[in-house]
Amino acid sequence: MRYLIGRYHEIALKGRNQWRFVDQVKSNLRAVFADFKLGAMRGEGPRLIVELPAEMDEEVAAERAALIFGLQNFSLSRPVARDIEAIKREAVAIAHAHAGAGSFRVRATRADKRFALNSMEIDQAAGAAVREAVGLKVDLENPALVITVEILPDAAYLAAGKRPGAGGLPVGITGHGIALLSGGIDSPVAAHRMLRRGLRLDFVHFHSHPLVSAASREKATELAEHLTRYQARSTLMLVGFADVQREIVARAPRALRVVLYRRFMVRIAAALARRSGARVLVTGESLGQVASQTLENMTVIEEAAALPIFRPLVGMDKNEIVDQARKLGSFETSIQPDQDCCSLFVPPHPETHANLDEVRAAERALDGETMVAEAVRRAEIVRLRFP
Ligand code: ATP
Ligand code: MG
């Protein structure tokens, strides 16, 4: 029998509300492991113990568990009797399976202090057994293999070390938002950061197909699929933006096009949010990065949104964002060539310090309500699922 033992991160600090967070972790685990039948789940202090199906490959289990926000770290453990001989035998078995490791140490913790030996005595007894049976060298400071022993009330659980968890808060616990996903580098990183803060996300992508190729739609879909691994299910809304752009190009001053495009994007996104119950918009904007992201333009853009806008990357440099995109695994998709709808019909020198009165005056020439309603009505809804 194998168990996933997850250890909470911030959840451990949540006091009386902790059960809500733990319930959310449990249901997220069931969703991300939906193609396997997970067994019983139980809490044991700051740990969640989940029975894994016998046929489940260890690496698959580890990959999936690493997607669960709210877990600081986890291990894939086997229980043995609370008896030092049984503990030694399992420690030796783990060491045999990792005989190439070179060095090791045993690290025991006693959640149940009624066990006869203390942690150090367990370390020493099991460590000596491994050294003799397998010939690995003990290294307390920098071991290649850590054999963890957790003494819990029902059994001793042993594993080949702890693996890093995804951290953060379980998806869904802090609310529901809509992330504006462009197909570029920044927006998937922004979405990931908010998922990690417990926000469940829908995704919206604006494209100017058929004025330009469908490449950006395909990239946005691929990125949304990638992000869906963290929440098991997503809704992606693909919004045709060409008609809105044609109106703006025909009726508004050239220099204001970029800001007006953006104001319509957030209006449409907010209208889509109303339909799905989302309460906040998320973008990948970073202060000063491009013309539309000056303080003045961001302020004018935000003014059009009926919902708050979260910009988790606002204080990050591009190279920091690129780093995160590589870690997330979105970078390679993001750098595929496409034609961003926002660069369509954009003058060489767009307004970088938009003035709200001028922008409002320009919008009086537009039938904004109809433009938004039409875009919402024609939005394509794509349901994504993981696994
Ligand atoms: P990204 O790498 O996310 O494309 P960027 O540096 O290219 O960002 P902009 O193109 O100015 O910056 O976009 C700023 C933000 O506006 C994006 O992070 C995204 O949240 C949103 N956005 C821009 N274009 C689109 C689009 N076509 N569809 C959906 N959201 C968009
Ligand atoms: Mg972009």
Image (cartoon, helix red, strand yellow):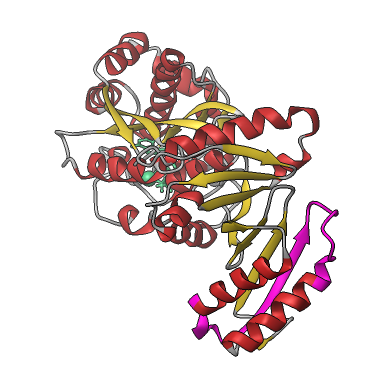
Residue sitting at x 82%, y 72%? 121
Residue sitting at x 34%, y 53%? 334
Nearest the viewer among 275 and 216 is 275
**Splitting the image into 4 quarters, where does residue 110 fall?**
bottom right
Which span is picked out in magenta? Answer: 97-121
Residue 316 x/y as whole percent: 58, 53
Nearest the viewer among 171 and 6 is 6
**Magenta region includes residue 117:** yes
Residue 177 x/y as whole percent: 50, 27
Q: Is residue 205 visible?
A: yes
Q: Is residue 262 left or right of residue 305?
A: left
**Magenta region includes residue 58:** no
Vertical placement of residue 97 versus 278, above or below: below
Nearest the viewer among 272 and 348 is 272
Q: Is residue 171 visible?
A: no
Residue sitting at x 18%, y 40%? 214
Residue 313 x/y as whole percent: 56, 47
Nearest the viewer among 315 and 100 is 100
Q: Is residue 238 left or right of residue 122?
A: left
